[in-house]
Image (cartoon, rainbow, N blue to C red):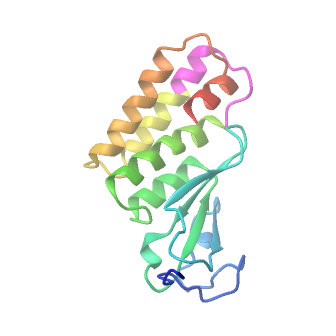
Amino acid sequence: MQLPELCSSASGPGEASETPDSIESQYPGIKVISVNTPALTPTLRWVGTAADGRLRLLDQTRLPVECVEIECARVEDVWEAIRSLRVRGAPAIGVSAAYGVVLGLQTLGESPERHTLDRRLADVRDYLGTSRPTAVNLFWALQRMRRIADTHHALSASQMRQLLL
């Protein structure tokens, strides 16, 4: 049995869609990836390792006309995706924020002092919290990330990223 295609793409597989309000020009860390697949495109997924991975999100603002993923390479990109409703639904917002924390920790070297790691983690959590201040699942995910970090004081930055991922 063939599933109905709910998403269609204006361009071929792997080609970026050209739109007048291209988010790539506004947010340099975001990469648009056109998807030409059936309805089973995941809402979000992590691609790569904790050290160099990226968050891929189904751009909810382009549905149902296009099925387009965006790739967030920086915590600022995740903030923009949450704020602009590119990611929708309470669970997806929370999970995206948690992945945003991992992206935010990628800017640290491999072995910063623990207080540097803790400060960066707090800054990233606070920043992501401003993306949608009324989203309960957003804050639930950010608090969960904080609790995990607080219970594992001896970990290096790379170990902490891996644990949080």
Q: Position of residue 31 (x, y in %)?
A: 65, 66
- Quick one: 4 or 74, which is closer to the camera? 4
Residue that appears at 32% across and 44% down: 137
Relative to 96, say whether 124 is above or below.
Answer: above
Identity of the residue drawn at 47% across and 82% down: 6
- Name the one closer to the observer, 116 or 156: 156
| Relative horizontal placement of residue 113, taking residue 100 as reference (left or right) | right
Q: Of all residues shown, which one is farthest toward the bottom?
A: 10
Per the image, is 47 magenta? no
Q: Position of residue 127 (x, y in %)?
A: 44, 42
Q: Of 155 and 76, which appears nearest the observer?
A: 155
Q: Is residue 115 magenta?
A: yes
Q: Position of residue 130 (x, y in %)?
A: 36, 46
Q: Quadrant of residue 108?
A: top right
Residue located farthest toward the front when viewing the structure as drawn: 1
The spot of residue 141 in percent (x, y) is 39, 38
Q: Residue at x 53, y 44 (%)?
A: 99
Q: Which residues are magenta?
A: 107-119
Count of numbered circles in the view? 0
Quadrant where the C terminus sits is: top right
Vertical comparison of 97 with 61: above or below: above
Q: Left or right of 94: which side holds 75?
A: right
